[in-house]
């Protein structure tokens, strides 16, 4: 059940990150989901470093760190994905 929640949270974080970032992102949905999952793990680690592990109710602080990390990871993935597609496209032209 833990993996299912990780995929669901990663999917939601990836979509929100893509929506928050200005402009159109060209990364596929599966990559945005993986980026969201990585962002959730990194955000949890950062929150733990700030002393926010678990609170009663909704962990807003932890979720904000998760979203921030997901945005950074999606931006990095978008940059790398676009560069790889451009390099592949230029290689076919030659």
Image: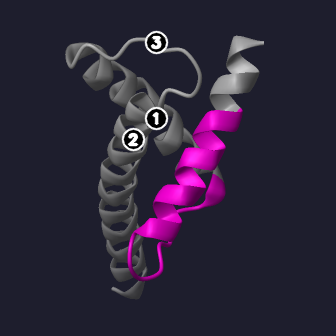
The answer to whether the residues at label 3 and label 1 have Cβ atoms under 8 Å apart is no
- Mark 3 neighbour density, 10 Å: few (under 14) some (14–19) many (20 or more): few
The chief SS type of the magenta part is helix
Decide whether residue 19 is among the magenta residues: yes
- Mark 1 neighbour density, 10 Å: few (under 14) some (14–19) many (20 or more): few
Q: CA distance from mark 3 to mark 1?
A: 10 Å
Residue drawn 42% across and 70% down?
A: 85
SS category of the residue bearing label 3: loop
SS category of the residue bearing label 1: helix
SS category of the residue bearing label 2: helix
Q: Which residue is mark 2?
A: 64
> In which image quadrant can residue 92 be found?
bottom left
Decide whether residue 38 is among the magenta residues: no
Q: Which residue is mark 3?
A: 54
Residue drawn 69% across and 18% down?
A: 3
First to last magenta residue range: 8-29
* Mark 3 / mark 1, whichever is N-terminal: 3
Quarter holding the N terminus is top right
Colouring: one colour
* Mark 3 / mark 2, whichever is N-terminal: 3
Q: Is residue 67 above or below residue 17?
A: above
The spot of residue 38 in percent (x, y) is 44, 32
Q: Mark 1, mark 2: which one is toward the viewer?
A: 1
Q: CA distance from mark 3 to mark 2?
A: 13 Å
The spot of residue 14 in percent (x, y) is 54, 51
Q: Which residue is mark 1?
A: 60
**Left or right: 22 with respect to 29?**
left
> In which image quadrant can residue 58 be found?
top right
Q: Is residue 90 above or below residue 41?
A: below
- In the picture as drawn, the residue positioned furthest to the front comes out as 56
């Amino acid at each position: 059940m833990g993996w299912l929640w990780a995929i669901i949270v990663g999917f939601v974080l990836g979509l929100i990150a893509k929506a928050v970032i200005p402009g159109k992102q060209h990364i596929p949905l599966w990559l945005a989901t993986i980026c969201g999952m990585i962002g959730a793990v990194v955000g949890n680690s950062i929150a733990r470093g700030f002393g926010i592990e678990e609170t009663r109710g909704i962990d807003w602080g932890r979720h904000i760190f998760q979203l921030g990390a997901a945005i950074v990871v999606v931006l990095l993935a978008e940059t790398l994905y676009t560069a790889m597609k451009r390099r592949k496209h230029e290689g076919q032209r030659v």
